[in-house]
Amino acid sequence: MSLQSIKPKISYRSDAGNVVDDFYVPCMTNAVLYRRAVGYFTSGSLSLAARGAARLIKSGGKIQLITSPQLSAEDTEAIEKGYESRGQRIRKLFETELEQLQDELERERLSALAWLISINALEIKLALRVDPRTGKLGRGIYHEKIGVFEDASGAMIAFTGSQNETTGGLVSNFESIDVYWSWDDPHGRTRAKAADFDDLWAGAPGNPALVVEDFTEIAKEVLAKFRRDQPPEFDPDEEQVRRTKRGPRSPQIPETIRLQDHQLLGIRNWVAAGGRGVLQMATGAGKTITALAAAVRLYEQMGLQALIVVCPYRHLVQQWCREAESFGFDPLLAFESINRWAERLTAQLNDVHSGTRKFMCVLTTNSTFSSDSFQSRLRYFPATTFIVGDEVHNLGSENLASALPEKITLRLGLSATPERWFDLEGTARIFNYFGPVIEPKFTLKMALQKGVLVPYRYVPILIELDDDERERYLEISAKIAKLWNADAESTSLKFQLLERGRLVASARNKLVALTQLFSSALQGQGHFLVYCGDGTVETETDLGVARQLDEAMRLLGSDLGMRVSKYTADENLDQREVLRKAIDDGTLQGLVAIRCLDEGVDIPSIQTAIILASSSNPRQFIQRRGRVLRRAPGKDAAVLYDMVVVPPEEGVVGESERSLLRKELVRFVEFADLAINSGEARATILPLQKKFNLMDL
């Protein structure tokens, strides 16, 4: 490995090429040591310092990194008064910075740093400003920015940049760096830069205004959560360049996919309807594949130039990406930071209009799609553009519906439940833009009959309130009875109904039943999913209050010793992917979730679902059932356990009680009727139907 083989240029500018691919990657590939001073640290500056570091991992090189925290007056006061040590205070700043990290590009790059530091190939030091007279910490930062690559022979390449290494100053506009190399450097600038860094690394002995401290061990602990199972092979920008150089493949339906009758008929009827409509297909029935196949047909028959897929969540964008790539598409993922997708989107639009690119595919989230940055680029999409709204019911809100482009005439909506719950106006917006539901509607019953989904057993579990909850339930119900006929729209009535709903959702005996279930019928079970509500429960351990999810985790994990993990909005995309794989390979037995697994997540290996709490929105329980019915190798059937609270015997059977139970029994009947044990399941709820005069269900 030799840096002299690179033939560097005296400067690099991002507007004249890809700086990562043209400069950082070749240098990282040939270096054994990379010395870097980055000014002040942020998640963005650390990410940018890691550009190309995946190559350094492969070559066995090391990084020495110096950065400078920006301390506030409050920070320095806490340190000087002894409230916290320097390391403790700076660690908190570091953790706070990384907790706010949302940009996936930065996360991927920090994964490279996490790998390097875990194998002792990365050292980090902090340069702190001090008052030379008192030795106390000063405000401000050490501002120097130096980069030096060195190979095994001692040859070096040094560079400096004119801007701070922050995402705002460096990526949003452009990067410009000046470069020097030791084998052709009559003025000795390269070695001077290296000497400056080495002096700083040694503690800046000639500069009493600086203190340099090691930060490696603390950084190792904080960065650990970014370390993946395998080291990254490429820098994210490098991977994009490799794909661009490889060139987009022609869209085509994979040989491994054979479209089923309902998919072919759906595409045919959608085309006959003028390229507008909504495909209403059961969860797991192949909506994504149908839409991509329609795009391929449009590409082949009319020269489709662009596909836009709008998804409600980031994880759905990633799932679409996996499928789209199998169809020969080269998808651009547009979500989160504009720095990651805006320039590429503009470049691809220019290529399509110039004829150098035949087809482009953009996958985005609802929030990014409706942003000013994306909306300002919509006008430049070619005339033959096809827009797909995944889980299209989400696009019925006033804000999102107003963002849908009228100039794009090829429109397809996808959803198992396109109608919005209690929102006629929102539902109308969906159908006005995308068009009506296209026949055939592919229902869950049809999917089960055709073997698209696995059959399932349905086990209702009736839950009684404990003494405290029963007393509270009766108290609230008495208030509701007084208000029910007086003013059905009163705020007081709605509040009491909400309170009773929360009480029912978080009934403590649900967790008792959960423990009994996993101590008997489900003992040792794997591939399961527990759906929790947002409500709180009183714990037995400390008589405190915990989320139902946290208490379920304690019961299953600590008490029963099962390998479980939570799945919530707190887990990032990388963590969710790790959890998905862990369930598939059996490393984890189960997941305990709140809402995040309601819509669009594919974990086909899940065989058992336990519903502790559910909203009365039909979409939620339909989506939840669909999660567990997807086919997977070795999976012949699924089981759903569903808990519902039975109103107290001594309670007055009034209209409010019937209304509350009706919402629960609608789900019970829906689930029971298509189950392979339908008669047994219906028999469980028949006494409730009779008592509350709900035989019409």
Image: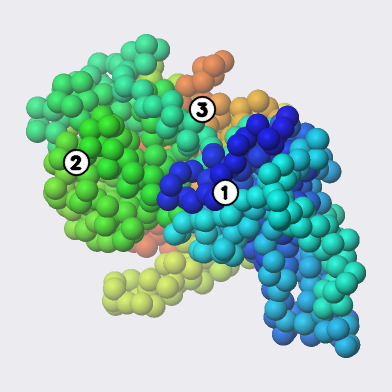
Instruction: Quadrant for the N terminus, please.
Output: top right
Mark whose residue sits in front, 1 or 2: 1
Furthest residue in direction front, as rendered: 186
Residue found at x 27% / y 56%: 375
Q: Earlier in the sequence, mark 1 or mark 2?
A: 1
Residue carrying label 2: 382
* Nearer the observer, 568 or 200: 200
Q: Earlier in the sequence, mark 2 or mark 3?
A: 2
Let me know if residue 537 appears in the view: no
Mark whose residue sits in front, 3 or 1: 1
Quarter assignment of residue 411 = top left
Dot 3, crowdedness within 10 Å: few (<14), some or many (≥20)? many
Amino acid type, residue under disc 3 in the picture: Pro
Spot occupied by residue 552 in the image (x, y as percentages of width and height): 66, 49
| Numbered circle sitting on residue 604 | 3
Judge left or right: residue 271 versus residue 202: left
Residue found at x 48% / y 68%: 499
Instruction: Quadrant for the C terminus, please.
Output: top left
Judge left or right: residue 354 versus residue 225: left
* Nearer the observer, 315 or 555: 315
From mark 2 to mark 3, how far is it between C-alphas?
37 Å
